[in-house]
Amino acid sequence: MTYREFILSAVSRLAPLYHVEEARAAASALLCHFLDIKPYKCLSEPDTLIGAREEEIEEALVRMEQGCPLQYVTGYAEFCGMRIRVAPGVLIPRPETEELAAMVMNDCENMELEEEQQFNILDMCTGSGCIAYAMAREFPAAQVFGCDLSDDALAVACRQRVKLSGARPVFFRADILQAPPAGLPKFDIIVSNPPYVRESEKAQMRRNVLDYEPAEALFVPDDDPLRYYRAIRSWCDAMLAPGGRIYLEVNESLANETAALFEGAAVRQDLSGKDRFVVVVR
């Protein structure tokens, strides 16, 4: 089978789950992953035979037909120019979360990092650790911490192979609905992408998300959708350093209600024009 034949077949077979362009991109990504080729090869050399790994690629496509996300099939997701490991039990990073990380980096690129005073960043509900590693790479003089309740997520976060010029993030287990553990420093930046999708919004989501990604990292009850943001506020009240900043990804339908929990908060939009972020500068 050639590259062209595989991609045409994959687009047809993935049609129940993906739009045409998404399916074509996923098929190309499978070829690039298993054959270790650049994406342009699928376009410039479409009649190249897949060869010895055709059976393995077919098995991967079957998994995607069954609803398994591409990132779980390949074992990684791209995030802020990094290859982040993911696995079942760990939320796949979204483009909006990449926007959140970029917002922190753009806003804080000129912040003074005093050599005599430790600059600390906390990523709450860290999941795969994607935000934490993005912060550690961008701010090599800072010490980055990440916390999560999920042992599966923490295991993945600790095993990331991101090259850094400074210290690696420190990950610890914590339930943010409880009081913060003792011994933590004050934080200059606190960032979080907590669960915020209401249970009633499940009907709008794809099967490959509902059947494969961890519900506890996504959903909140309709009668208490801001529970994690109230918990984050409590942690920030206890641990945010003077002049510190808070960056949150939020439910677009509840952005103003979330911002109302934090004094001096501002709502920001994502690239799609949706109210997706809340930012607080103390």
Image: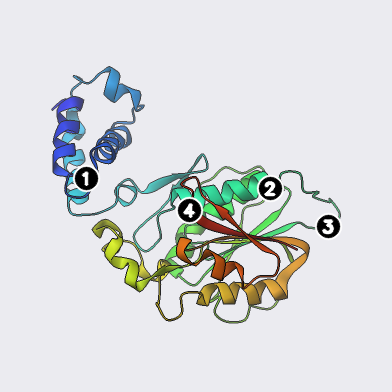
- Give the distance between the C-alpha atoms of the residues marked 1 and 3, in whole angstroms: 49 Å
Q: Residues within 10 Å of mark 3 (few under 14, many from 20)?
A: few
Earlier residue among tags 4 and 1 = 1
Q: Give x and y (percent) for residue 146.
A: 58, 62
Residue at image position (35%, 73%) is 199
Earlier residue among tags 1 and 3 = 1
In the displayed structure, 275 sits above or below 98; it is below
- Give the distance between the C-alpha atoms of the residues marked 2 and 4, in whole angstroms: 19 Å
Q: Label 2 sits on what residue type?
A: Asp
Q: Nearer the viewer, mark 4 or mark 1?
A: 4
Where does label 4 land, which residue? 274
Nearer to us in this view, 53 or 213: 213
- Give the distance between the C-alpha atoms of the residues marked 4 and 1, in whole angstroms: 34 Å
In the displayed structure, 140 sits above or below 6; it is below
Where does label 1 land, which residue? 60
Q: Is residue 94 visible?
A: yes
Where does label 3 land, which residue? 117
* Residue 169 found in image quarter: bottom right
Nearer to us in this view, 264 or 235: 264
Q: Nearer the viewer, mark 2 or mark 3?
A: 2
